[in-house]
Amino acid sequence: MSTYYWEKKQRSQNIPITSIRCLVEALTTSSIQLTNVPVEVHSLIHAEQSYSEALAAYERSSLTSLEDVKTMQTNIQALIAANDTLHEALIKAEQNLPNSLNFTQQGVSYTAKRAAGSYRITWTEEVQKYDGNHRETGLVRGGHGAREFVHTLCRAYEGAQLRHQNERNRLKTAMAELRSELPDALDQAIRVRTAWERAEEAKRVKNLVNERKEHVLSRGESMGFTSHVSEIDVDEEQRIIVSMERFAPTSSGESDQGHSLSGLQRR
C-alpha cells in the first residue's frame, strides 16, 4: 500500500537588487520594511531631499528686488552644492551595497544575502512525496508568506527600477542644461546685484546730502539768514554750495551785511 509523507525542503529565490536607491524607493510603495538601512542610504535620502529643496528654491528665484537678487545668488550656489552632494551620495550608496538585507512584512522577518550580484531569499517549506518513488506530488505546505514576499518585493523593485531609469535619463539631460545655464545665471545675478548695490549706495548718498542741505537751510533760517543754493561740478564731483547772508542795522542806521557759507559735496 502506497503512502504519502511530508518532507521539509529549503527553497530560494534570487532577487536582482543592484540599486539600493531603487530598493529603498520600492519599499515606500509596499508593505515591506528594510530594518538594516545602510548609513550610505540615509545620506542618499538626505541628499535627495536637499537637492529637491534647492531646486525648488532656485525655480522660485526672481530679480525684482535687491533682496531677491541676493537670494537668487545664494540659491544658485546652494543648488550647485546640492547637486554635487547628491552625486557623491549616489556613488557611495551604489558602490557599498550591504552583504545582507533584513526585511519585515506583516510581522515576519526575512533575510536576503548577497550572492552572484543579486540577493537571495531562502525559506523552508514542506513538500508532499510519494513513498514509492519519493517524487513530489506538487502539494506544498507552508512557505506561502515567503513566496508572496518575494513576489511583492520583485514587482515593487522592478517598478522602482524603471522609474529611476527614466529619472536618471531626465536628470542627465537636466544637469547638462543646468551646468550650461547656471554660470550665466550666476553671472547675471552677480551683475544685477552689484549694479543694484551701486544704485542703492548712490540713492543713500543723495538722500544724505539732501537731508544735510535741508538741515543747514533750516538752521540758517532760524538764525535770520537768507540763503541761496547752487550746484557746481569740480573734478567730476558734484558740489552743493549753500550761501547765506544776513543784514543787521549799524549805529549810523545803515545795514551791515554779514555772510555765512556752507559747502556740501556729493559724489
Image (cartoon, grey):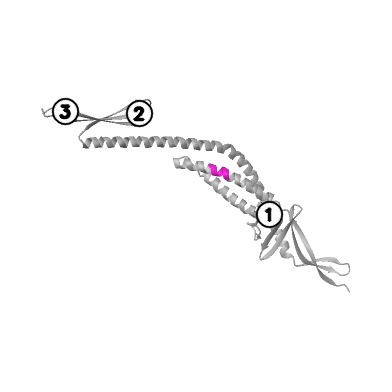
Q: Residues within 10 Å of mark 2 (few under 14, many from 20)?
A: some
Where is residue 193? Give x, y as percent: 47, 37
Q: Nearer the viewer, mark 3 or mark 1?
A: 3
Q: What amino acid is at disc 3? A: Asp
Question: What count of labels does the image hold?
Answer: 3
Mark number, residue 256: 3
Give the residue drawn at x 52%, y 43%: 75
Task: Kindly report the distance in space between the C-alpha atoms of the residues bearing marks 2 and 3.
Answer: 32 Å
Disc 3 vs disc 1: Cβ atoms closer than 8 Å? no
Quarter of the rendering containing residue 80: top right
In this view, 94 is above or below 211: below
Secondary structure under tag 3 reads strand
Task: Kindly report the distance in space between the C-alpha atoms of the residues bearing marks 3 and 1.
Answer: 101 Å
Q: Which residues are magenta?
A: 76-81
Which of 112 and 266 lies nearest the eye of the viewer? 266
Where is residue 254? Give x, y as percent: 13, 27
The main secondary structure of the magenta stretch is helix
Quarter of the rendering containing residue 210: top left
Q: Is residue 65 visible?
A: no
Give the residue drawn at x 63%, y 41%: 173
Mark number, residue 238: 2
Q: What amino acid is at disc 2? A: Gln
Q: Residue furthest front?
A: 251
Q: Could you tell which of marks 2 and 3 lies nearer the N-terminus?
A: 2
**Could you tell me which quadrant the N terminus lies in?**
bottom right
Magenta stretch encompasses residue 8: no
Q: Is residue 265 visible?
A: yes
Q: Circle 1 is placed at which residue position? A: 157
Q: Could you tell which of marks 3 and 1 lies nearer the N-terminus?
A: 1
Task: Kindly report the distance in space between the C-alpha atoms of the residues bearing marks 1 and 2.
Answer: 73 Å
Which of 256 and 116 lies nearest the eye of the viewer? 256
Q: Is residue 73 left or right of residue 1?
A: left
